[in-house]
Image (cartoon, helix red, strand yellow):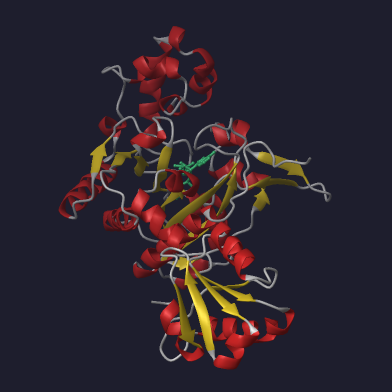
Amino acid sequence: MITSQKGTRDLLPPETRVFGGVERTARTVFAAYGYDEIVTPIFEATELFVRSVGETTDIVHKEMYTFTDRGGRSVTLRPENTAGVARAFVEHGLAQKGTVEKLFYVGPQFRYERPQKGRFREFRQIGAEVLGAADPATDAEVLLMLFDFLGRLGFTGLEAALNSVGTTECRPPFIEALRTFFSERDESLDDDRRRLRENPLRILDSKNPGLAQLLSDPGLPSMLDFLDDGSKRHHEELVRLLESFRIPHRIEPRLVRGLDYYTRTVFEVTSRELGAQNTLVGGGRYDRLVSDLGGPKTPGIGFAIGEDRLVDVLPVATREAFLGQGGPQVAVVPLAPGDVADAMEIAQELRAGRDGAPPVRVDLDATARGPARGIRNAEKKGIRFVVFVGEEERASGEFPVKDLRTREQSRVLRRELAARLSA
Ligand code: HAM
């Protein structure tokens, strides 16, 4: 038997309804904030991620699905979507429009990680990016939209951990301070010596549990003490806006995030149910990414939600509601081969919705050929109503409708079926 690859999974019905419900909600909420959808390719030039996400990050260092294609090009399955969005922004000259681009995406990403609860090699992200706006109000509105979305899904008690990583100009003295701090405590570093050499910032988001004590040392330098005036004002204004809009947040001076393109604002949302290592949402500002990729100087900010993790911790009521929003509501069962054409016609009438009745989702069960099988099939599929179409029913114009929840059966006129079944 050929099975799915390690770290990938099939999403089967009815679970796909939950993913569908989450995505519909995202589309509705993001549209309300003026965002439009962007779709970028699943694979890109490897160089794109090396230059944007950064060579010393875990993602580029050891998690990318990189291969040489038949034409000898090095390509990579996208480990995230911000780089692709920025590349598309540059490639299509979107900066020349002179407007602020507000974009969202939904789709699979790929990272060669050790699979565990909430961590996959193929996973889905729902993300949003704003390109062309540098002001803290944009950061605040991005977070407002994120919490609006999470609230619509029924989440309560989540909060964003917030920090500023400053600009590339004010970061070197901070990195130096970190290097000094960690060099003096070299013995606890272990696997993180490479990070110390290459980029000490990466130690701050190390997943190595042995570092916990070191990272909670009160002497650990804080980026907030190294911010330039502009970054400091940006951070303070953002915090003020978050407070006035009551967006739940806490300042987390150790937060740096595992991607190199961030400048100033960074944030994450974690959920206790996911465990400490698993973040639900990550995001931040990237004011140099577009120009680093050869485009005009264009500030940007965005976030990505791990959809698999989001579905995993979705409030039960929301989950139930999404499960109820899909799947057939009615099975139409022709009792003999001669009844199939009429049964198909009735199914079409119900699907179209009639005389003001809303459309009904109908499963035509042409295989049952009898009431008992028809009922059994419907039960297996979780369908509530079964309509039987036989010769006698066709002649009388009245059709038996069985409600499998109450076990009651009644006869309903053909023209009243739609109204009765959508009630
Ligand atoms: P990230 O923090 O690398 O940021 O990923 C965002 C989210 O994707 C994570 O918080 C997590 O929920 C989910 N995720 C990441 N890896 C996995 C995995 N192996 N399995 C399941 N879920 C996973 C980014 O990707 C940035 N592009 C976010 C961003 C957008 N920053 C600015 N704009």
Q: Residue at x 44, y 62 (%)?
A: 324
Q: Is residue 245 above or below residue 193?
A: below
Q: Position of residue 420 (x, y in %)?
A: 42, 80
Work out whether residue 230 or residue 239 is closer to the camera in this orientation and state it.
Answer: 239
Left or right side of 68 for 287:
left
Q: Position of residue 130 (x, y in %)?
A: 41, 59
- Choose top left, top right, bottom left or bottom right for residue 92: bottom right
Q: Position of residue 375 (x, y in %)?
A: 57, 65
Left or right side of 81 for 142:
left
Work out whether residue 97 or residue 361 is closer to the camera in this orientation and state it.
Answer: 361
Work out whether residue 34 or residue 306 is closer to the camera in this orientation and state it.
Answer: 306
Q: Residue furthest right?
A: 70
Q: Quadrant of the N terminus?
A: top right
Q: Position of residue 417 (x, y in %)?
A: 47, 84
Q: Residue at x 36, y 60 (%)?
A: 133
Q: Residue furthest left?
A: 244
Q: Residue at x 40, y 46 (%)?
A: 283
- Choose top left, top right, bottom left or bottom right for residue 120: top right
